[in-house]
């Protein structure tokens, strides 16, 4: 309990500190992200997951067609104990919406291997989880440097059984991410503490042990420092410390395959792995 409380305070503190120092706030249009997942249940609660999503920015600012971005994801998670798990991940992204969706650098494409460490616990019927991820982004062009990324996600959910097979799982989660800068040139702008954060709410609908659907909504903020722009009177009119805020809506459709060694009471995680 104390461990979870400390992590929650740390995440809220970073969020409040970043918001308090922001000077400008800009809004973008809605991003829509439909995703299909395939999950293989293994021995214990271990699993392998692959997913593919498309991304569309609505409104007149759409940078390129109905779906202008995509992501392919793969991951494996092994449970060390009842509360702790870890595993490797791999993301391949492309298109013009990488940066808009807060999942990368806004490049034409990148490949990102990583690793996660997860801690879960429960208070009554509520399950709390903390996920710490470290990733290394390799852009698919020769003009941009590789960068390391750290993520911290705090979440809580509860399962409401409807029938023997069907259930609802409402869930809320906040994730903050920061690029790890090990060295910065003196001429570079001082970066923000958090690069982007996402507050997500969802209701997962488990139709059966092999199929579930999760509609979700999120509010996403990208924090950045831009070169300041001044008018003729010398007053700063744009740039500087700024926040780009916008809504995201998604629909996750997951198909689950139970391996021959999978437990009969296998506990499935939400679709936001």
Image (cartoon, rainbow, N blue to C red):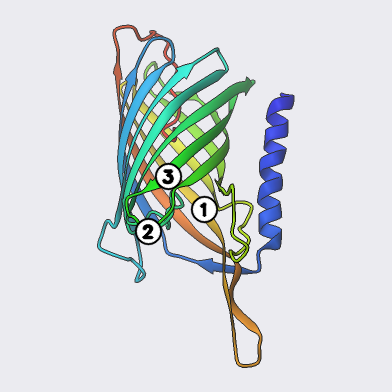
Q: In this view, does 186 lie to the left or right of 94?
A: right
The numbered mark, 2 or 1, whose residue comes first in the sequence reads 2
Residue name at image x 29 percent, y 57 percent: 68
Can residue 125 be seen in this snapshot? no
Residue 150 x/y as whole percent: 54, 41
Q: In the drawing, what numbered circle is on residue 219?
A: 1
Camera-nearest label, 2 or 3: 2
Q: Nearer the viewer, residue 146 or 263?
A: 146
Q: For the residues marked 2 and 3, what is the alpha-carbon distance in whole angstroms?
A: 14 Å
Q: Are marks 2 and 3 in contact (CB under 8 Å)?
A: no
Residue 251 x/y as whole percent: 36, 43
> Callout 1 environment at 10 Å: few (<14), some (14 to 19), or many (20+)?
some
Q: Residue furthest left?
A: 65
Q: For the residues marked 3 and 1, what is the alpha-carbon distance in whole angstroms?
A: 24 Å
Does 146 appear above or below 59? above
> Callout 3 environment at 10 Å: few (<14), some (14 to 19), or many (20+)?
many
Q: Name the residue under label 2.
A: 143
Q: Is mark 3 on a helix, strand or loop?
A: strand
Does 79 appear above or below 155? above
The quarter of the displayed image where residue 141 is located: bottom left
The quarter of the displayed image where residue 224 is located: bottom right
Q: Is mark 2 on a helix, strand or loop?
A: loop
Q: What element carries label 1?
A: strand
């Amino acid at each position: 309990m104390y461990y979870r409380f400390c992590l929650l305070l740390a995440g809220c503190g970073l969020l409040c500190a970043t918001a308090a120092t922001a000077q400008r706030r800009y809004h973008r249009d809605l991003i829509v992200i439909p995703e299909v997942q395939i999950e293989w249940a293994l021995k214990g609660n271990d699993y392998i997951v692959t997913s593919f999503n498309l991304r569309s920015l609505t409104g007149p600012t759409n940078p390129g067609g109905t779906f202008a971005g995509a992501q392919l994801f793969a991951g494996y998670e092994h449970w060390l104990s009842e509360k702790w798990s870890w595993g490797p991940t791999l993301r391949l992204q492309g298109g013009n919406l990488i940066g808009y969706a807060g999942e990368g650098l806004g490049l034409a494409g990148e490949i990102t291997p990583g690793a996660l460490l997860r801690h879960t616990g429960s208070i009554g019927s509520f399950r709390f989880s903390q996920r710490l991820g470290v990733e290394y982004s390799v852009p698919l062009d020769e003009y941009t440097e590789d960068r390391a990324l750290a993520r911290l996600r705090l979440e809580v959910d509860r399962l409401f059984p409807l029938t023997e097979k069907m259930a609802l799982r409402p869930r809320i989660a906040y994730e903050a991410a920061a690029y790890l800068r090990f060295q910065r040139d003196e001429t570079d702008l001082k970066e923000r503490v958090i690069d982007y954060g996402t507050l997500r709410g969802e209701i997962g609908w488990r139709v059966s042990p092999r199929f579930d659907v999760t509609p979700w909504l999120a509010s996403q903020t990208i924090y950045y420092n831009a070169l300041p722009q001044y008018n003729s009177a010398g007053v700063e009119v744009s740039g500087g410390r700024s926040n780009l805020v916008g809504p995201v809506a998604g629909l996750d459709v997951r198909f689950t395959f139970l391996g021959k060694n999978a437990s009969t009471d296998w506990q499935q995680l939400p679709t936001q792995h």
